[in-house]
Image (tube, coloured by chain):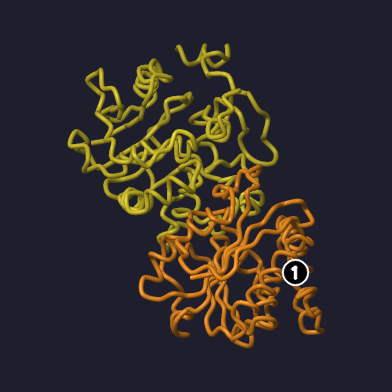
Chain colours: A orange, B yellow
Amino acid sequence: MEYIKYTPELSNNWSRALSGVAKQKPWAVQRVEHSMTSSQLESKLWLGTELLKVHPEPFNNAMIIGGWFCHFLAEVLASNNNVKFMCNYDICRESQLISYKFNRRLKDSDVYIASQRNVFTNKLENTQLAKGEIDLVINTSCEHMFPMQMIKDRHFKNTYPLCVLQSTDDDQYDDHINCVKDLDELTEQAGLIDVMYAGEKILSNGMKRFMVIGR
Amino acid sequence: MINILCVRWGDKYDDHVEKLKLQVENHCSLEFKFFCLTDKPKYSYDIQLPTTWDHNYDPKRNGFWAYRKCYMFNEELFPQLDGDEFLYLDLDILIHNSLDPLFDRDMSHPWIVRGWWNDSNNSKKNYGMIKSTPLNSSIVRWNRSQLAPVYNHINRFAEYVFFTYSTIDNYFNHFWYDIYDEDLNIEQISSSKKLFKGFERGVAYSWYKGNIFPNDMQLNVIRPENMVCLFNNSHSVSSGKMGDEHMYEIDEVRELWNT
């Protein structure tokens, strides 16, 4: 996967989202800019590519943890990986609201919802649970949060969704509270026992990213 | 009965407790009992701090370093606390005016310092990055059992909370306050996330950060029209940068502190 298809529908959503943020939430403009860098796109395209190799079949119900504005990721998952439904959990209300602007087309077609909820301490959205078993868990920002084993223990005691996890060893930022030194540590933190992909990539901003896919 | 509490651990603030007690006696006309929750009880007002959460604290990370302040939210741990009204004060504060108004207010929700020196938009922008909290736990006012949910939550998710939050103020902001709805009246507050209500302007200002954003932000000045001056600087403490001077090293402050 080398690019996102910039369709008229997507263009409409994203341009409205950007102008809406500029007008209504000017304090969030810089955050949105940071979410749309080439490095952000690279890491999501990488995810889409490797996930398709490991699992070419559709996914029915995906859980995204800390998905932020989720513009690139939602589009990749919907168009490249055939994800039928996804819920993006983020603790930040602005992220929830802004992500709805970017993903209006997906929300309207019942593919995307966003939830301001901490899934380490709270239950999942009823709307998501009503969709049946969650078969895909994605966290592209593991360095920002507690180890993923807690999510498995709390929500997936008896099921084994495919997990796609990204993290980094770049600990220069205060909010990188859980950097890992390598792929093994990322795998171990999540308690994955069946690893189908493990790789690392230097993004254009110079940051090393790790990604593991497994159960 | 009113209980006025402080918490001291380690040796850094050894002499501050007596100073705080004197300040409280000078600025509270109501009948109250004064207690200090401490790891090393020495005086009649000292109460032994529990150690239940010690194993969750990692000195290397220094995350959630002020966790000992949260034991008091479960009053049942301390039989000495027999009243229903509680006021917690940090040790490094300067009280300018009467504390009595803190006991004459709507107590349908507990109160905490809302740092009005913070830019709300900055707090919103940095919410997900767990920084720029608008809250400051240097002063907390609650009635018995109101903060039990906080104690119970920390107790239940201790490993997660200690790992994730560098300061208790950031933790409070994420779980017990709603920065996006803080202008609502108390009557409209319903969700558990909105447990805390922020003190109004004029209750507390910060020596190191100012008073009210954006127009009254001069640093390092005494504002005697306010109730309390705060000297804590959570960020510098949590990040290991103890560059700020101790409050009694400031001539102007020491003079007031000693009167």
The chain identifier of the residue carrying mark 1 reads: A
Q: Residue at x 49, y 41 (%)?
A: B167
| Kind of residue at badge 1 | Gly
The N terminus of chain A is located in which quarter? bottom right
Q: In the orientation shown, which residue stands out farthest toward the bottom?
A: A109
**Position in image of residue B20 (x %, y %):** 39, 22
Q: Residues within 10 Å of mark 1 (few under 14, many from 20)?
A: some
Q: Name the quadrant containing residue B244.
A: top right
Q: Name the quadrant containing residue B51.
A: top left
Q: Is residue B43 left or right of residue B100?
A: left
Q: Which of B93 and A209 is in front in this view?
A: A209
Q: Is mark 1 on a helix, strand or loop?
A: helix
Q: Looking at the image, can residue A145 be seen? A: yes
Q: Which of A146 and B239 is in front in this view?
A: A146
Compared to residue B224, the image places residue A25 above or below, namely below
Total numbered circles: 1
**Position in image of residue A173 (x %, y %):** 65, 44
Give the residue at mark 1. Answer: A20
Q: Looking at the image, can residue B127 be seen? A: no
